[in-house]
Image (spheres, grey):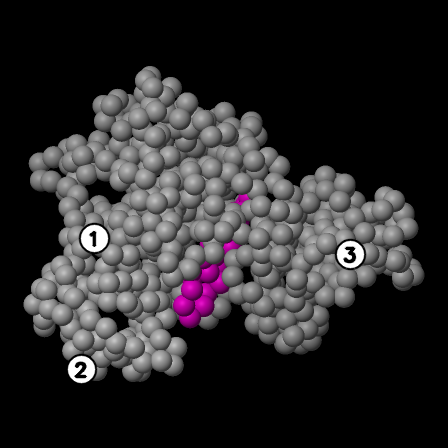
Amino acid sequence: MIHYQIQPIDPNAHLFAVSVSVPQAEAGQRFTLPAWLPGSYMIRDFARHLIGVRAQRPDGEPLALSQLDKQTWQLDHATGAVELHYQVYAWDLSVRGAHLDQTHGFFNGSSTFVAVVGQESNPVKVTLLAPQGPQHQNWRVATAMREAGAERYGFGDYQADNYDELIDHPVEMGEFTLATFEAGGVPHDLVLTGRHLADTDRICADLRKICEYQINLFGGQAPYDRYLFLTQVVGSGFGGLEHRASTALVCGRGDLPSANEPGISEGYRTFLSLCSHEYFHNWNVKRIKPAQFVPYDLSQESYTRQLWAYEGITSYYDDLLVYRSGCVDQATYLQMLAEGMTRVTRGVGRFKQSLRDSSFNAWTKFYKQDENAQNAIVSYYTKGALFALMLDLTLRLETQGRRSLDDLMRLLWERHGQTGIGTDEHTHQALVAELLDRDVSDLFAYLDNTDDLPLERLLAQVGVEMRMRAANGNGDKGGQGKPALKASLGARYRAEAFGVRIEAVAEGGNAHRAGLAAGDRLIAVDNLEVAGNLDTQLERYSEGSELAIHWFRRDELMSGTLELRPAPMDTVVLSTVEGANQALWL
């Protein structure tokens, strides 16, 4: 059994100490750290945070160790019992890596535990040690890893069947709020780290409804014995990453409801959708997964054209199941859906990149987006969700409600999730063809072309009207809203003490034609100082006005002319049609 040990040795310096004990090293034994972690498709180069990697015998005798590449080390001569020691610099406050300070510690195993090459299938013991000092005496541990002597939520020994399981159980340690609920006969724990005033009873009640709905959707049997929502509560933040029996989350403090807070805020509904999204991944990507991920190769990019199915379908269900479980009403769900649709329609990149290409290029184009992303790419999350909506509506309409996307997911679970057989690029199409009993190449052609999906027509058949309007300002996300602008800047911006900073410019828009670029600081329009209410300032002028503008690009003053052409009709509004039959879908 391979034995890992990890301890926070200097929270002020953000350092974990890690050791790996190998009972029987082979000749030329290698050790390697993943370059990325499942669910986050970008090379992270976690090994750059390793410090002082060295090898020794159990009695302390030093052993020669050579580094072969950025993430791999090899014993020069030794065999038998060996130990590897190193430190991990942990200052990444996200769901992906490791973070340590005086308040808490968090890590993913992929960023902290090197693999013993050739022995990844061996069972593993993990010893989690508390930091020294009385200021840490109340620290606890939260992880879905199985105890092997440690008490639940205590430091001590844990176990995993193999390396793959080891790195799929993130660990939170510190002083945290713990709340528990049961869903599908399985205990679920909500762990909140960070200052908050959250109403944990309300959150648990809502999460219980969402989790039970999903468990029942897939047959009523949860694929784990226990589940954790490990949540970092910060001033402002958002993120989630799925694991086999837990999820790591980051949310803003204001996103969580306080006691006696009425209604549901936008921040809280976003938090519930995030939880719903990561929880749905328990089936769709953790167990139903592309063949390219069976097994994972974490040393380099692992390309697949199927992320539209694993992130897109999941993104469709996340909001939908918050609605189906009763956490939001129908009008709120349609608002959420309209906002997602608007994110797609506002980017001309949807006409330049297909969903399959978006999936394949996740490693560079999606995960390394720049200020031109909306003009160059489409998200396999957001447009993938709309493709899933198209499939769901088509299944329901063509079968008069006898079939839906739920049936597709249950087939995937039965034939791939429960068998461990990965899906290929034709799996989803073949299953939809089976459900509809027809050739569905017309539907799946939308994965390879860049046409807009026929959602307006499909939604109309289930009693939902889709219409387009112009945005009503820089902060307009879509859906129902205030009256639209007559003209717009054609750029995203943020207010600064002097002027506004351009963040992204829409191709073909007014800002683009005027010569503005991301990073510019617009300071004057029509020889008047620009303030944070730029939208209101532009509304004073009639359509077709040509306004002198001045801006700084770096430290150089520039000038140009802003022609106020009509604001584009790029914002989606959804509403139900009175008397129509929404029951077929909603």
Cα distance in 3D space between marks 3 and 1: 53 Å
Quarter of the image where the C terminus is located: top left
Cα distance in 3D space between marks 1 and 2: 29 Å
Quarter of the image where the N terminus is located: top right
- Closer to the camera, 249 or 394? 394
From the image, give the main secondary structure of the stretch colored magenta: strand
Q: Which residues are magenta?
A: 227-251
As helix, strand or loop, the secondary structure at mark 1 comes to strand
The residue beneath circle 2 is 528
Q: Amino acid at mark 1?
A: Thr
* x, y percent for residue 138: 61, 69
Task: Answer with left or right where residue 583 lies relative to residue 350.
Answer: left
N-term mark: 3 or 1? 3
Q: Amino acid at mark 3?
A: Gln
The residue beneath circle 1 is 571
Q: Amino acid at mark 2?
A: Leu
Q: Are marks 3 and 2 in contact (CB under 8 Å)?
A: no
Q: Are marks 3 and 1 in contact (CB under 8 Å)?
A: no
Query: Does 249 appear in magenta?
Result: yes
Q: How many residues crowd around disc 2 within 10 Å: few (fewer than 14), some, or many (20 or more)?
A: few
Report the residue that reaches farthest toward the top: 437
